[in-house]
Amino acid sequence: MTGTTLPEAALAYLSNAALTPLWAAARGRLERNRLLAKGTVKVFVDDEGADVLAGLLTTTVTVGEVSVRLDKLDARLRESAAQAGLATVIEAITKVPLQDRTAAREQAAAVRALALARLDAALAGAGLAYAAWVPAFVAGVQQAGLLTRAGEEYAARCADRAGAVLTALGTRTNLSSPDPWSPGPGPVWELAELASRCTGTAHGLDDGTLTSALVLRAASAAFGEPVPVRATARRALWERLGVVTDVVSGTVLTWNLRPPGTDPWSRMMQARADLSLVTHLTVHEMRAAGAGTLLASSGTVVSVCENPQVLQAAARAAVPGVLICLSGNPASAGVLALNRLIAAGNDVRYHGDFDWPGVAIAGRVLASGATPWRLAANDYEAAANSLPADETLALEGKPVPTPWDPALAVAMTRQGVALHEESLLKLLLSDLV
């Protein structure tokens, strides 16, 4: 209606600054009333305003607070030289369109309901409808207004795409576990590769996209962690899901890893082992070597640790055993190496810190097919009892189940002592001789 014009004389009369409070109050009431001229507004008018309003309403108006019925004002405007209703007059004077705020709220609610229905359908399609973390995830999406702000069509499309991504990551989903995602078995995806498969474009999961935000919010809810705010935290969360955003920077540390092949890459790895060099393997390098290239000879025992200090000590002692270090929670390079070694039938055994984050990581690694390496309750108790009282660390945080040895979690809770891998260094190195 903003294209409607009023007769010049009528527009000049009605645009008098003394009537500005009236038009502002009437606008607010109209926008709440579905643009219907009904109800009453109260405004304060001075001498000039009283005169102008009296001329408009053809009635006596006194200085001070005045009650104006909008239906009568609408009728008077139509009878006047303006020859237009209240809504048209307000738009012509202010040059700002009126908004039916009630209708807008209803439309937003309908869009939100449809988008949430699509999101529920996408979660169901990914086999996650009954996951314990889903209500918190959906509530977070609602509170953040992610789907409402996006618009009906785009929000629905992104909800479907997020469901497709979660479905593709389903090989890492274990809803019976306290930690829904384990590091494997399952593919290690490149972000662009996963995006192309699930969204139709290599940039569909780029940082800042709605689909990416939905997937990462789902992962955060599943892990019981805050939604990542910084780009580095978002990259780390993708890594935890087995999705690598950078195939050349992230590495897994290896010691004495000797691929048995005769191809150039295998010979290079053998030469590095002969030179007693620690090797940083990237996802790019392992993929370039080829999916069929063995990382170790069949039957090789491959030990895996959490802390780089353990691998550094192994290199310093020049132990003959094979050791891989995940440097904490396994990232994509570590996941890929573990998957390949386990799939090839190698005996992969894992040791980590005896604290709650450490046993949580152990649970994920063991779920991939690795076996425990000195991770039993008696290993923990022997180490804890051997430490001098002034060298013990308090066990802090929320207890985590240890399904490979339930007695371990019981012993850790009872002892209340945290043990890092360094405290078992001599014992671990003796297993690598």
Image (cartoon, rainbow, N blue to C red):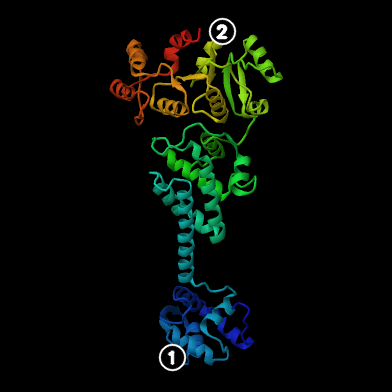
Q: Residues within 10 Å of mark 2 (few under 14, many from 20)?
A: some
- Residue 220 location (% of width, % of height): 46, 41
Quadrant containing the N terminus in the rendered view: bottom right
Residue 430, relative to residue 86: is it above or below? above
- Give whichever of 243, 29 is nearer the camera: 243
Q: Quadrant of residue 293?
A: top right
Where disc 2 sits, the SS reads loop
- Tell me the kind of residue under disc 2: Ala
Mark closer to the chain start, 2 or 1: 1
Q: Quadrant of residue 44?
A: bottom left
Q: Quadrant of residue 221?
A: top left
Label ID, residue 104: none
The residue pinned by badge 2 equals 318
- Give whichever of 351, 94 is nearer the camera: 351
Residue at the far left in the pictured view: 414
Of marks 2 and 1, the one in the foreground: 2
Where disc 1 sits, the SS reads loop
Residue 170, relative to residue 320: is it above or below? below
Residue 308 visible in the shown view: yes
| Left or right side of 151 for 287 | right
Q: Residue at x 38, y 37 (%)?
A: 176
Residue 205 visible in the shown view: no
- Residue 330 location (% of width, % of height): 51, 28
How many numbered callouts? 2
Q: Residues within 10 Å of mark 1 (few under 14, many from 20)?
A: few
- Residue 99 location (% of width, % of height): 52, 72
| Left or right side of 121 for 9 | right
- Residue 196 location (% of width, % of height): 63, 45
- Tell me the kind of residue under disc 1: Thr
The residue pinned by badge 1 equals 60
